[in-house]
Amino acid sequence: MSENSTVATQTAYPWRAVARTVVAFLIAILPYVAAALADASTATQSTALIAGAGVAGAVTKALANPAVDAILKKYIPALATAPKQG
């Protein structure tokens, strides 16, 4: 069995994976924070928190898109999966 010579970007650049996860989390909790700051009811805050799970999934999926990664490499290189080559 041959060994694969490629290394996952999460292994090669772990701090980038952490940064992307933190950004996805911060975006995901925005509905909850907005509801809490607006002094909304507990039910509304709970709904906003639950909606955050869907938002986190959507943001994570968007960050996994190669086109989005190319844009990040150009404009926000710290959030790209890997540094620019060359």
Image: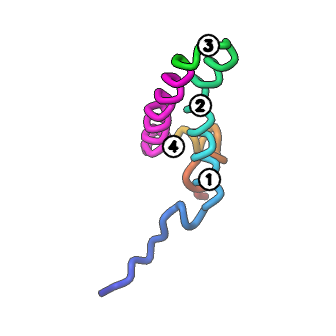
Residue 20 at x, y percent in the picture: 59, 46
Q: Residue 29 carries which label?
A: 2
Tag 1 and tag 2, C-beta contact below 8 Å: no
Q: Which of marks 4 and 1 is in front?
A: 1
Under tag 2, what secondary structure? loop
Q: Distance of mark 4 from mark 1, alpha carbons?
A: 18 Å
Q: Residue 40 carries which label?
A: 3
Q: Distance of mark 1 from mark 2, alpha carbons?
A: 17 Å
Few, some or many C-alpha atoms within 10 Å of disc 3 (few <14, some 14-19, many ≥20)? Answer: few
Magenta-colored span: 45-69
Residue on which the image places disc 4: 70
Q: Distance of mark 4 from mark 2, alpha carbons?
A: 25 Å
Q: Which of marks 2 and 3 is in front?
A: 3
Q: Callout 3, which amino acid?
A: Ala
Tag 4 and tag 1, C-beta contact below 8 Å: no
Identified at 61% across, 58% down, the residue is 86
Q: Callout 2, which amino acid?
A: Ile
Q: Callout 4, which amino acid?
A: Ala
Q: Residue furthest right?
A: 37
Asked whether residue 83 is drawn in magenta, I would say no
* Lower sequence index among marks 4 and 2: 2
Q: Nearer the viewer, mark 1 or mark 2?
A: 2
Residue on which the image places disc 1: 18
Identified at 69% across, 17% down, the residue is 37
Residue 1 at x, y percent in the picture: 30, 87
